[in-house]
Image (cartoon, coloured by chain):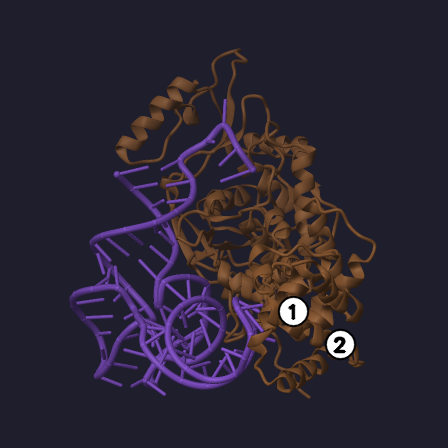
Chain colours: A brown, B purple
Amino acid sequence: MIRAPTLRRGDGRDAGAPGALPPVEPNMPDPDRPVVTRIAPSPTGSMHIGTARTALFNWLYARHCGGRFLLRIEDTDRERSTEVAVQVIFDGLDWLGLQPDAPPVFQFARADRHREVAMALLEAGRAYRCYMTVEELAAEREKARAEGRAIRSPWRDREPPAGSNTSHVIRFRGPLEGETLVDDMIKGPVVFQNRELDDLVILRSDGVPTYNLAVVVDDHDMDISHVIRGDDHLNNAARQTLIYQSMAWEVPAFAHVPLIHGPDGAKLSKRHGAQAVGEFADMGFLPEAMRNYLARLGWGHGDDELFGDEQAIAWFDVRDVVKAPARLDWNKLHHVNNHYLRIADEERLVRLVMEALARRGRTPHADDEARLLAAIPIVKDGAKTILELADLCAFALARRPLVLTEKSASLLNEETRARLARLAAFLLETHEWDQPGLLERLREFAAAEGVGLGKFGGALRAVLSGDGSAPDLAGALAALGRDESLGRIDDALSRSQ
RNA sequence: GGGCCCUUCGUCUAUCGGUUAGGACAUCAGAUUUUCAAUCUGGGAAGACGGGUUCGACUCCCGUAGGGCCUGCCA
């Protein structure tokens, strides 16, 4: 079988013509480069849900391409970075099930390397020492803004002050002419006029590298092939591209994903209910539900809505990420979570409900797990979160004798009491104590009494739950079990009126 | 001020020059009925606006409007 040779761009017609090599396209990534993605959060104390989605996209893309997914902690801001804040990131990724393929890189620990690159840039004439004072800078900023241009430092073309070691920063020396292309995988080609780009500071006066230098150096050293990050970095990508080019490093492919907004379209904040992944965990969302929902937020695959990791990995391509920002929709998140709650392993749900109850400060009883295991299958279809599931299980966890609410007690009168007594006797003869069987028995009983279920349903529910909140009657009886059910009825009937 | 990005039902999205503009969530109506929920059936709901290009535009181009990001010795 003859196979067409894989041609390099420009091969064929140009083959053999010396000097006729195809033009270098600065942002054309090497298609054979191994795929390495990364999530690079800064430890600010919480992990934003948008960061979580960006992590998910990086993870999905790496998995899809058979590449690697890495984690870098951007802790160069020493004021804000704490061990606790770093732990929050680890926990968040861990909970989401997005484990990086290598130990995390701590950016601050690499400051020497960043300085080394800054010096190399300086020696190559691609950077310069800027001695502007804060006042001078402020004045220039104001002036530049008024004139509608980027700020410029007079030290770009000036000799350093003789023999001085006055405080100064090191700025990148960007080209004043020409343009820089960022061929974004999501946004498409974006062209920046170089004159619009200011000479960014790469080394602070205290010698600490800045973000824009550190990302470039770290992404290069970590061999990151695809930088998939928030929309807010699109402008930075142009300046970073210039740094890559100055170092003669291969520029990674960029993909800038739009931010997640609140339901009202404004920037997502605390007032929208939640912002940090830890909050979603505490509210009782399942990590697999978060992954599915987050994947569908800003990305889609035809009409597919509910799908697992394997499918997402098979289908995902950053190029298909939607360009516009998406709003967080609690209704849909709840719906997706409900789906995963339904198919989740019930022992696991028992554990999660127990944890939720403990967080609420409830003192556990020895048979809680057993009761939950019986109740969960019956109530879980109606639960949107673990917290709701816990609420729906409350009736099963209540201890005898139940305290009846006023409303419940009012449903007990002479007639309903007598009927419940007869029902108790009737149920005593019931041996197949399961939901469908019990429903059948209830109907038989109603028929025998010559009434509808409505005649005693409310009273039965009141007696079984105390406050009336229980699933359907057969379900409640099934969840409670024979002894507990009959016991609760008995408790209520034997209580003085 | 300047640069850049974005704009399909209320929301998330499909469509990628020719469709009755599809799906999901939400919503409404009906069915079921022992509260709530769940379930089933059905309905309403969209291409910001104005110009082009084209036989034909939600899809391509330009402009306007409205959102957003950047414009830090934050990341």
**Label annotation for residue A441:** none
Residue picked out by circle 2: A425
Q: Secondary structure at mark 1?
A: helix
Residue A97 on image: x %, y %: 69, 57
On-image quarter of the N terminus of chain A: bottom right
Residue occupying image coordinates x 66% and y 62%? A465
Depth check: A414 or A462 in front? A414
Residue picked out by circle 1: A417
Residue A365 on image: x %, y %: 80, 52
Q: Residues within 10 Å of mark 2 (few under 14, many from 20)?
A: few
Residue occupying image coordinates x 63% and y 49%? A282
Chain letter, disc 2 residue: A
- Badges 2 and 1: C-beta atoms under 8 Å apart? no
Depth check: A217 or B51 in front? B51
Q: Position of A359 compared to A365: left or right?
A: left
Depth check: B18 or A496 in front? A496
